[in-house]
Image (cartoon, rainbow, N blue to C red):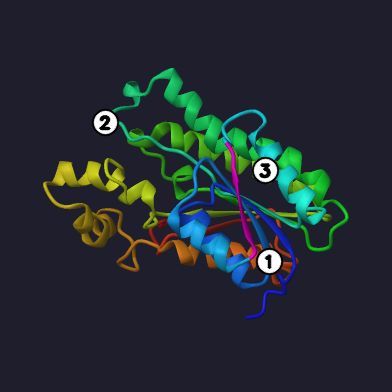
Amino acid sequence: MELNMHEKVCVITGGSKGIGLATASALAAEGAHVVVGARNTTKELERLCAERSVTFVPVDLASPGGAAELIDVAVDRYGGVDVLVNNVGASEPAASINEFSDEQWQRIFDVTLFSAVRAVRSAVPAMRGRPGAAIVTIGSLNTRLPAGMIAPYCAAKAALGNFTKAVAEELAPAIRVNTVSPGPVRTPMWTDPGAFADVFADQASTTREDVMDRLLPEMMSISSGRVSEPEEIADLVAFLASPRAANITGADHIIDGGMNKAA
């Protein structure tokens, strides 16, 4: 499917790995100019920058001025912004809600919620008047299925979903705003050493790979029998960012392999 994204200027927060990197790759493959903000680059992102029209901006999106710095680079280089993808997020698992410190709560909200608030504030003036302008925010199925071991993440994503709905209502019809809410995805948030898969592996006396391939789909009743891949999330994001989704706004799109059973 041709998405008609050629020469569109797309800004992605947290695009050095996982869903953000996959989204940068998908949009760049459609001919878009992609500007990625993250604290650090990766070999995969460096390769993408060398092969496509992708620019990496080293920036701390949890800081008050980080999002504005990222948007300024896109505007200076390309004259405006057509698409903003609010992807950056943070989570730190714990055995109990009471184990999370105030500092952890604040850090997770700074990265997951306030980075998006600031990115929208900075990007919207650069998006006005540009045909087909769109914002896509990466939410989470955990807004509907909260878990104590990641309570700050769940709360931040829930607030992010509410904020995105408000933005969609205010900016319509000039700028479309949608949310994509994945279930478990094979990303570093799960697969890095010490991340969620290792926590489950320790509890079940198994391996990280077994958690991702067997235990997690079984434990979470994922109908498809597997977790999602980053590229699958990226494809949905790219579609929602494109003119092919011209009458879709204010909606939350779940992609979870059938994990959510609610009507």
Estimate the spatial distance between the alpha carbons at disc 3 and disc 2, rounded to whole Å: 35 Å
Please report the residue visible at 66 percent of the width from the left and 36 percent of the height from the top.
117
Q: Comparing marks 3 and 2, which lies closer to the viewer? A: 3
Relative to 49, residue 40 above or below: above
- The first of marks 1 and 3 along the sequence is 1
Estimate the spatial distance between the alpha carbons at disc 1 and disc 3, rounded to whole Å: 17 Å
Residue labelled with disc 1: 32
**In this rendering, would 179 be left or right of 134?**
left
Classified by dominant secondary structure, the portion drawn in magenta counts as strand
Residue 174 x, y percent position in the rendering: 83, 55
Residue labelled with disc 2: 95
Tell me, for residue 70, which label it has, or none. Answer: 3
Dot 1, crowdedness within 10 Å: few (<14), some or many (≥20)?
Answer: many
**In this rendering, would 5 be left or right of 203?**
right
- The first of marks 2 and 1 along the sequence is 1
Task: Identify the amino acid type marked 2.
Answer: Ala
Residue 234 x, y percent position in the rendering: 53, 63
**In which quadrant is the N terminus drawn?**
bottom right
Residue numbers of the magenta segment:
53-59
Q: Secondary structure at mark 3?
A: helix
Q: Which is nearer the eye, 145 or 88?
A: 88
Q: Secondary structure at mark 1?
A: loop
**In this rendering, would 165 be left or right of 95?**
right
Q: Secondary structure at mark 2?
A: loop
Magenta-span inclusion, residue 216: no
Task: Identify the amino acid type marked 1.
Answer: Ala
Q: Which is nearer the eye, 158 or 186?
A: 186
